[in-house]
Amino acid sequence: MTEVTTPATPTPMPMPMPRIGDPAPAFTASTTQGEINFPEDYRGSWVIFFSHPADFTPVCTTEFMTFARLQDDFARLNTKLVGLSVDGLYSHIAWLRTIQEKITFRDMKNMEVTFPLIDDISMEVAKKYGMIMPGEDSTKAVRAVFVVDPEGRIRTIIYYPLSLGRNFAELRRVVIALQTADALDVATPADWVPGEPVIVPPAGSCGTAKDRMAGTDEGVECEDWFFCTKQVSEAEVMSAIAR
Ligand code: BEZ
């Protein structure tokens, strides 16, 4: 007798999550501002690409109003905003209209959202970016934030759960700190904000280590050979990162 075997159903391979330093995974999507080709359309700009769990939910509403308020501030940092949720285009449009027409949050009202919000009802983009975390919710995206640089490379990833609204001062600080690191070849210490001392790259040779400790590098102060800082004013930071 011939034995009939059912072919094993292939186990779907989990999608690898993008990592810091990776090129941002490319996609084309329909948004509230028309079709976008990401990250290609954003070459030359920084981008905050973020997901939210669902339209017509309160925490997301407060976040969208805050993003809308900060959009010009981010634009001055050469940074554009792109949002996504597992909702369709008509839901996005209806929600954004409701926000503008009806919702007051803190001192914000009549807030118009003019950055693109992606229709990802298929979850294709959300899965590509690791925005669906089934332990939290298998049909909604968590609050993910990808900061993408002008060359289309992922530079920072931050995740928040559904219940926790993002800290926008931190998102702004992250963009400024990344741009400062690039412009001035420095690193930024814990809780750094512009105007505070920055970290100069560690001494790469015994000679540099010796010079550092001898105090011959102007403006550089060292706690030890590997831990040196220099003062950069807020004005110097803002002028170094200006477009
Ligand atoms: C909110 O945005 O309010 C929300 C969304 C999903 C789960 C919990 C809260």
Image (cartoon, rainbow, N blue to C red):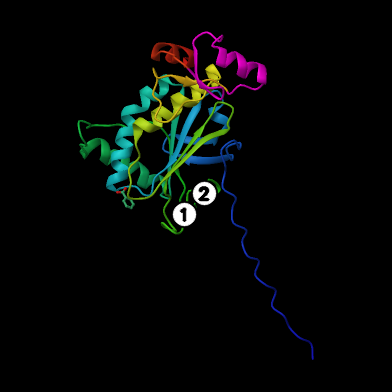
- Magenta span has 225? yes
Return the mark for residue 133.
1
Q: Quadrant of residue 61?
A: top left
Callout 2: few (<14), some (14-19), or many (20+) C-alpha neighbours within 10 Å?
some
Amino acid, disc 2: Gly
> Left or right: where does residue 1 sit relative to residue 103?
right
Q: Which residues are magenta?
A: 202-229
Amino acid, disc 1: Met
Residue at position x 27%, y 39% from top? Answer: 99
Q: Is the shortest distance between ligand 1 and the CB of mark 2 under 8 Å?
A: no
Residue 92 location (% of width, % of height)? 36, 43
Residue carrying label 2: 130
Return the mark for residue 187.
none
- In this figure, what is the number of numbered marks? 2
Label 1 and label 2: CA atoms lie apart by 7 Å
Is residue 155 depicted above or below 74 in this figure? below
Name the one closer to the observer, 199 or 156. Answer: 199
Residue 202 location (% of width, % of height)? 58, 23
Name the one closer to the observer, 238 or 221. Answer: 221
Is residue 186 depicted above or below 99 in this figure? above
Residue at position x 56%, y 38% from top? Answer: 20
